[in-house]
């Protein structure tokens, strides 16, 4: 338990904001230095990896500043992603939806698990904003358009391609973390439900291990046997995946206990494992 506390204390949660961003938020100040710095940082943290950080930035900047902000497609990022290719071992991919509060502490206590933010592209662009000025060829540090008002938002397109790549690369066991305390735990139009799920390959993936986690104080709205998670399981089964589904996995409930200041009711929430072997 003490080890868990230590990891938690040292761990800085990096938030990846998939929420709609207000008009007032412009390109992140010093974005060039941040992106290039994080790239070097990534190579230091992952010995043996080699990337041309300045070349990656040059491709990024040139492409973004070439065209209007709402016209940056997934295809526009292909060249840059080509400079950032990486392989990671099987049994490591951790996908999640609406469980941001928990996912990074889970990955911290199970360090073999990788989230999108542990990949080079995720690490470099996490929590950043960028767009071009309307009529000019410089970044707009004053304001960027909202995702919803944009056909092809430069930030959205990058995360779309990054999520797709991340799921396509997944092999062996894949872990999925869903939120059992919201109305729709599995949302077919979320990044997980639309992009990542469709990009998983039944040939490469051995098991999809789903964890539905309710907040400590509840409510328990969704679970492995009711609501939208059943729909997810049906999709997996139709596509020929093997799967397991666990409600309120004990380690995940314990992590929530550690995070919260309130007293814990872990033992009162039922923990159940469902399995299906194809
Ligand atoms: C938007 O992108 C498309 C395809 O790359 C291009 O044909 C079109 O001219 C662009 N529109 C503007 C306004 O730049
Ligand atoms: C589930 O969603 C609720 C509401 O958005 C949030 O407060 C809670 O932290 C989420 N639970 C987890 C485990 O992320
Ligand atoms: C993969 O998942 C299955 C089902 O949960 C489990 O039995 C197996 O041990 C896992 N394998 C690895 C390598 O984690
Ligand atoms: C599902 O996700 C989409 C995209 O994030 C969102 O607009 C929609 O409100 C969500 N639906 C529900 C029922 O939460």
Image (cartoon, rainbow, N blue to C red):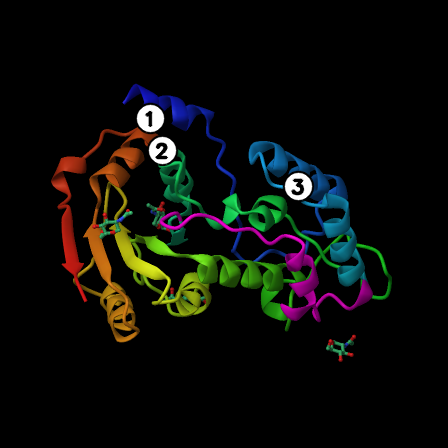
Q: Earlier in the sequence, mark 2 or mark 1?
A: 1
Residue at 62% in and 37% down: 43
Q: Which residues are magenta?
A: 66-92
In the image, residue 183 above or below residue 128: below
Q: Is residue 123 magenta?
A: no
First along the sequence among labels 1 and 3: 1
- Nearer to me, 25 or 52: 52
Who comes first in sequence, dot 2 or dot 3? 3
Q: Is residue 37 visible?
A: yes
The one of 38 and 218 positioned closer to us in this rendering: 38
Which residue is found at the position 69% from the left and 58% from the top?
Answer: 80
Percent of width and height locating residue 12: 50, 32
- Provide the residue designation for mark 1: 4
Residue under label 3, please give it: 39
User: How far apart in space, not on screen, are marks 2 and 3 (Cα)?
Assistant: 24 Å
> Residue 98 appears at what percent x and percent y?
39, 53
* Separation of residues labelled 1 and 3 (CA atoms): 28 Å
Front of the two marks 1 and 3: 3
Quadrant of the frame with the C terminus: bottom left
Residue 266 appears left or right of 191: left
Q: Residue at 27% across / 54% down in the picture?
A: 209
């Amino acid at each position: 338990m003490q080890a868990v506390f230590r990891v938690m204390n040292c761990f800085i949660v990096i938030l990846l904001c998939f929420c709609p961003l207000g008009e007032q938020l412009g390109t992140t100040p010093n974005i060039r230095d941040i992106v290039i710095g994080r790239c070097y940082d990534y190579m230091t943290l992952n010995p043996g990896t080699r990337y041309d950080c300045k070349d990656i930035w040059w491709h990024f900047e040139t492409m973004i500043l070439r065209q209007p902000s709402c016209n940056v497609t997934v295809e526009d990022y292909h060249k840059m992603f080509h400079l950032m290719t990486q392989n990671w071992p099987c049994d490591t991919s951790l996908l999640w939806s609406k469980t941001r509060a928990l996912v990074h502490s889970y990955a911290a206590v199970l360090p073999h698990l990788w989230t999108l933010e542990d990949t080079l592209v995720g690490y470099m662009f996490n929590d950043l904003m960028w767009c071009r000025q309307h009529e000019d060829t410089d970044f707009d540090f004053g304001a960027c358009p909202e995702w919803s008002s944009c056909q092809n938002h430069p930030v959205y397109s990058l995360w779309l391609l990054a999520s797709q790549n991340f799921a396509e690369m997944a092999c062996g066991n894949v872990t999925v973390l869903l939120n059992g305390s919201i109305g729709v735990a599995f949302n077919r139009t979320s990044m997980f439900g639309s992009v990542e799920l469709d990009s998983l390959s039944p040939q490469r993936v051995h098991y999809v291990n789903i964890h539905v986690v309710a907040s400590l104080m509840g409510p328990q709205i969704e679970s492995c046997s009711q609501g939208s998670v059943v729909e997810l399981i049906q999709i997996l089964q139709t596509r020929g995946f093997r799967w397991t589904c666990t409600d309120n996995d004990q380690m995940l409930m314990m992590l929530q206990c550690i995070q919260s200041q309130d007293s814990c009711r872990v033992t009162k929430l039922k923990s159940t494992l469902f399995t299906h072997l194809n």
